């Protein structure tokens, strides 16, 4: 039977990125492996990838089997995840001597990344951060951001039609706590939401290693349970009251909250938001700051419009929210092997 140490060792091995080699031919597979260390809702890793070495190009496509229709009915989080992956690939290509153009195309739609040679070292700090970035779901130490950290996060959190609002101060944080609590009540009172969430929980290291995806008990600091038992009691555990107490403590322990807002609420903006949040969290990681997502006010439709009005940003759409702060690193989540999502293997 697999143990916690097996889980930790496997996750660490998956995060060994190659040293940059700017004069070498494109290593598409290495870039895609770096891409797969991106964030995704429930760690579903909802991507399929194709390589065209002749153009050269990488095509990222949604994996419909990994959708979460209860929490993400319009696939907004899914396409943000694809944007996160695309941004990691762009950064990996950049430190290896290639510029990358990213386009959203087709009816599906797909994300096409095309490459050509460039000069310069690329974004070395962000590339190194890819291997150590994680969603850290613990309490933080509540220390404030420095002005330099705040400026770096604000700069990283800008993109085409997307920007990041950095919220600090007790009044703002308490308002967000109340929104999150209301979102938890709505979501955790929904049996369909609980079933969908439970589907992605890996209650022990053996299940986590078998699937190499989802929300691992090891990562979340939960005790190991047989998978059948975890599923059987999940309805008793997934309750709004305990979740609200935990979330309130965690949000109040944060240095700041970051809300990504976009001019438009459609697929290209979702992909761009994913790219921006990946840059933002990699920058935070390089600054030794941790992060975790708190998207309940955005995911619950009846709260989202009210949350947008509270932000007071006119016609901009809130698309993601996360808390940022200082904490010890947690165990890393697992990723599926390349062969599981590389739809058409090719030399690269």
Image (spheres, rainbow, N blue to C red):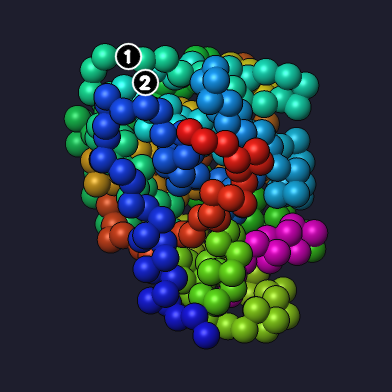
Between disc 2 and disc 1, whose residue precedes?
2
| Disc 2 to disc 1, C-alpha distance | 5 Å
Instruction: Say left or right for 101 vs 22.
Output: right
Q: Secondary structure at mark 2?
A: strand
On the image, the x and y values in percent for residue 243 come to: 56, 64
**Residue visible at 57% across and 59% down in the picture:** 213
Q: Position of residue 101 (x, y in %)?
A: 49, 16
| Quadrant in the picture for residue 300 | top right
The image shows residue 207, relative to residue 254, as above or below, that is below
Report the residue at 44% width, 70% height from top.
7
Answer yes or no: is residue 281 visible. Answer: yes
Q: Tell me if residue 14 is in the magenta stretch.
A: no
Q: Main secondary structure of the magenta part?
A: helix
Residue most extreme to the front: 347
Q: Is residue 319 above or below residue 324?
A: above
- Secondary structure under tag 1 reads loop
Density class for disc 2 (Cα within 10 Å; few <14, some 14-19, many ≥20) is many
- Range of residues picked out in magenta: 192-203
- On the image, which quarter does residue 226 sit in? bottom right
Does the residue at mark 2 contact the one at mark 1 (Cβ under 8 Å)?
yes
Task: Report which residue position mark 2 lands on.
Answer: 98
In this figure, which residue is indicated by the disc labeled 1? 118
Tell me the residue at 28%/61% (across/down): 328
Residue 80 visible, this orientation:
no
Q: Position of residue 2 (x, y in %)?
A: 49, 80
């Amino acid at each position: 039977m697999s143990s916690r140490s097996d889980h930790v060792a496997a996750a660490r091995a998956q995060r060994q990125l190659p040293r940059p080699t700017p004069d070498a031919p494109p290593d598409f597979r290495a870039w895609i492996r770096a891409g797969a260390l991106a964030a995704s809702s429930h760690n579903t890793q909802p991507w399929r990838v194709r390589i065209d070495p002749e153009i050269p190009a990488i095509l990222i496509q949604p994996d419909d089997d990994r959708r979460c229709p209860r929490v993400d009915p319009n696939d907004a989080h899914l396409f943000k995840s694809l944007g996160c992956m695309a941004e990691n690939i762009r950064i990996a290509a950049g430190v290896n001597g290639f510029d990358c153009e990213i386009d959203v195309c087709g009816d599906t739609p797909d994300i096409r990344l095309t490459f050509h040679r460039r000069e310069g070292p690329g974004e070395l700090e962000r590339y190194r951060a890819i291997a150590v970035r994680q969603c850290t779901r613990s309490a933080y130490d509540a220390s404030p951001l420095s002005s330099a950290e705040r400026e770096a996060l604000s700069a990283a959190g800008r993109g085409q039609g997307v920007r990041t609002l950095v919220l600090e101060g007790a009044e703002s944080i308490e308002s967000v706590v109340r929104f999150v609590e209301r979102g938890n009540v709505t979501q955790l009172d929904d049996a369909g939401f609980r079933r969908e969430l439970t589907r992605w929980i890996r209650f022990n290291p053996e299940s986590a290693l078998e699937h190499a995806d989802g929300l691992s008990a090891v990562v979340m600091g939960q005790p190991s349970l047989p998978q059948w038992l975890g599923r059987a009691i999940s309805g008793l555990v997934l309750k709004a009251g305990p979740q609200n107490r935990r979330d309130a403590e965690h949000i109040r322990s944060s240095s700041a909250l970051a809300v990504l807002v976009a001019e438009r609420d459609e697929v290209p903006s979702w992909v761009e938001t994913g790219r921006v949040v990946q840059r933002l969290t990699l920058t935070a990681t390089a600054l030794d700051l941790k992060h975790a997502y708190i998207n309940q006010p955005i995911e619950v439709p009846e709260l989202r419009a009210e949350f947008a009005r509270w932000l007071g940003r006119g016609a901009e759409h809130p698309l993601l929210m996360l808390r940022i702060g200082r904490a010890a690193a947690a165990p890393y989540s697992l990723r599926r092997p390349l062969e599981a999502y590389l739809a058409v293997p090719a030399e690269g």
